[in-house]
Amino acid sequence: MSDRAHVLIAEDDDDVRHWLAATLTRAGFATTSVASGQAALDHLLDAEPRPDLMVLDLDMPGGGGMAVLTHARVPVTVPAIVVSGHGDVDRRVAALEAGAVDFVCKPVDARELIARVRTHVRVSARAAEWRDRDPLTGLFNRRGFLGRLGDEVARVWQTGSPLAVIFIDLDNFKDINDRLGHVAGDALLRRVADALDACLGQPSILGRWGGDEFVVALPGADGASVDGIAGRVQDALLRHLDPEPVGASLGIAWLRAHDLAGAATDQVPMALIEAADRAMYDDKALRSGLHRLP
């Protein structure tokens, strides 16, 4: 989510729609306003990124807030606050059971609306952050890492600054699980995550790709600094994980602005990781893991 949360407003009454947009804009939100449920659905299907929250009028010609909440093609992953001039219990319950996170009766008080929007945006952001985290290590999981890597790929295109990705695979980790059990293996993975975090620091982005595989994105790094980082990673894993030090195979892939010419940028993050993964397998065999993104 961007620093300025984006609210989609669907309201058929022109005066109310303009008031909602003006109120939320003054409160610091970015807003998009539409006049029907169908227009809201179209925006949810086409807009990238999706809005952070919706404010939906319950009753609109051509499909109101309930139609948006129950539409099969749009999973309700964007929190929705329903507003309506009819606040009877049956309507409120129906909207909440359909997936709305809140219900506000018209006429809407500006302070109440702003407070409710801020609360739900904050709760949604925290939930999204947890969805992006690996529960064992606290690092970014695959979903979270790919999202951050996509942001860095866009920055390469905008600024021309290079980007490196390191793919890390622990050596003989299965043997530790077999000898000591999975509880000990999980504890070792947490120590690996802590060691990597300590030796990498900012502005690196660190994630657990899965199993005993870790990934690192290094925005703006040059060849010498990446080589030094790779050495620090090996040293951290070998020296600071007593009583079970582990080795690791590393693969490095690079992205520079000219690599993006004609590329489908939404596919670049995975291609970059796959290139680093291939380099890691070469490192296992040859102990030399430097690859460029094809």
Image (cartoon, rainbow, N blue to C red):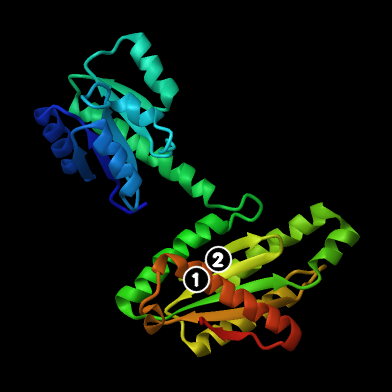
Residue receiving disc 1: 204
For residue 262, what is the image quadrant?
Answer: bottom left
Q: Residue 199, how many percent across, how many down?
A: 59, 73
As drawn, is 237 to the left or to the right of 202? Answer: right
**Residue at 53% across, 47% down:** 131
Relative height, residue 254 to residue 26 (above, below): below
**Residue at 57% across, 85% down:** 291
* Total count of labels: 2
Q: Residue 84, how many percent across, how many down?
A: 24, 20
Residue receiving disc 2: 206
Identify the amino acid type marked 1. Answer: Ser
**Residue at 53% across, 55% down:** 143
Q: Secondary structure at mark 1?
A: loop
Q: Secondary structure at mark 2?
A: strand
How packed is label 1: few (under 14 Cα within 10 Å), some, or many (20 or more)?
some
In the image, farthest residue toward the right: 179
How packed is label 2: few (under 14 Cα within 10 Å), some, or many (20 or more)?
many
Viewer-side residue, 207 vs 157 = 157
Do callouts 1 and 2 mark residues in contact (Cβ within 8 Å)?
yes
Viewer-side residue, 188 vs 55 = 55
Give the Cα separation between the discs numbered 1 and 2: 6 Å
Q: Residue 105, how many percent across, how many down?
A: 25, 18
For residue 75, what is the image quadrant?
Answer: top left
Q: Residue 290, how many percent across, how many down?
A: 59, 86
As drawn, is 109 to the left or to the right of 244? Answer: left
Viewer-side residue, 77 vs 271 = 271
Relative height, residue 92 to residue 57 (above, below): above
Residue 223 visible in the picture:
yes
Relative height, residue 222 to residue 238 (above, below): below
In the image, farthest residue toward the left: 15
Residue 232 visible in the picture:
no
**Residue at 75% across, 84% down:** 285
